[in-house]
Amino acid sequence: MTITLRAREVCPQCTGEFDWDSYDSVNVSVDPGLKSALLDGSLLRRRCPTCACTFRSTRGVLYHDMDLGLQVSLRPDGQLPGPAMDKLAEVMLAGPVGKGYRLRWVETVDALAEKVRVIEQGLDDRIVELVKVWLLGQEGHLEDDLAFLRVDASEGPLEFLTSDGRRPRVPRAIYDRVQEQFATKLAPDTGWLHVDRAFALRVLGVKLGGPPRSSARGTDQYGAVRQESPKRRDPDGVVTGLAMFGGFAGVVAWVFCGSAQGVAVAGAWLVVVLLLAWRLHKQ
C-alpha cells in the first residue's frame, strides 16, 4: 500500500525546519500516477516556506510494484536495511504473494529508476551489472558511469548511456552468455541486495575496500559465492631476514674470535640460508 506521513524537513539553504507530507511507501500498482513522479524525483521535491529554496528530500521511500514483483528501498543515507526491513522481507518472501520477489536498495533516484527499467525489460539486474563491467572493460574505462537504458526491440541488443552522452550497445548474446556463465556463482536472490558495480566486481572476484553493501540473509555478505585464496608466506622476506642475521653473526664472530672463526661462522650461515631458500621456494 501507499503510506504517507507528516515529516520534519530541514532546508539546506537557511536551515529552517518545516513539516511536509511525505511518502514513506509508494505502491505503483495501486497508485500508478505516483510512479513517474517518484522516478523523475519530483515526488521528493520540497520548497522551503521561509526562503523559497527548492531541494530534494533526503528521506527514504519504499517503491513497490506488485506487477513486477519488485520492491526497491531508496536510502539516500546509504545505511543498510535494518532488522525491521529484514523482518519484512522474511515475512513477505515466505508467503505465496512474495514468491519470486526481488528486493533491492539503492542510494539515488537515478539508481531506482534504472532498477525499474531493467526489471521492466525482463532482465536480471545482477547480470546487467556484470555486463556493464564487461562493456567498460572493453572500452578501458572501468571508472566511468554507465546506466542501462533499454533493450532495443524484442531480444535485441542492450542499450546503455555513458557519462559523456554516448549510447553503446551490447548484443543480447553477450547478456545470455554472462547469465549462463555466472548462473551457479550467484547466491539465491532472497534478501535486500545492493546491486551495483561493486557487487559485480565482487562476483568477479575483485576485492574492494569498505564494508559489504548487502543485508541478504542466508547468503554470503555480497550475495555471491566467493572463494578466498589461501594465504602464502613471503619467502623472499624470510630469506632476506636470515641473510641479514647471518651477516651480523659473521661480523660479531670476526670481531671477537678473529678472522678465521668469522669466515667459518658466515659460511655456515650462508649454507643454512641457501637450504631454507630452496625449501621455501619449493612450497
Image (spheres, rainbow, N blue to C red):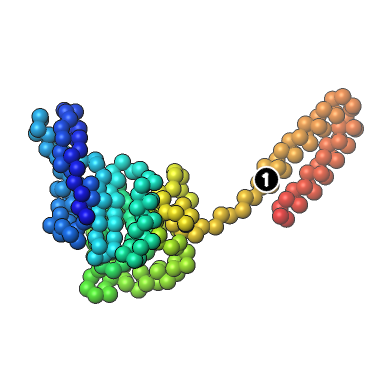
Picture quadrant where residue 91 is located: bottom left
156 or 245: which is nearer to us? 156
Which residue is at a point 82% across and 27% down the rendered structure image?
252
When the figure is inspected, residue 54 is found, relative to residue 224, above or below; the finding is above
Compared across the picture, whether 232 is left or right of 263 comes to left
Compared across the picture, whether 92 is left or right of 64 comes to right
**Callout 1: few (<14), some (14-19), or many (20+) C-alpha neighbours within 10 Å?**
few
Which residue is at a point 87% across and 24% down the rendered structure image?
256
Which residue is at a point 26% across and 65% down the rendered structure image?
68
Residue type at mark 1? Asp
Residue carrying label 1: 236
Place of residue 168 in the rendered image (x, y in percent of width and height, measured from the top left)? 27, 63
33 or 141: which is nearer to us? 33
Picture quadrant where residue 259 is located: top right
Place of residue 262 in the rendered image (x, y in percent of width and height, measured from the top left)? 86, 32
Q: Which quadrant is home to the C terminus?
A: bottom right
Q: Is residue 168 visible?
A: no
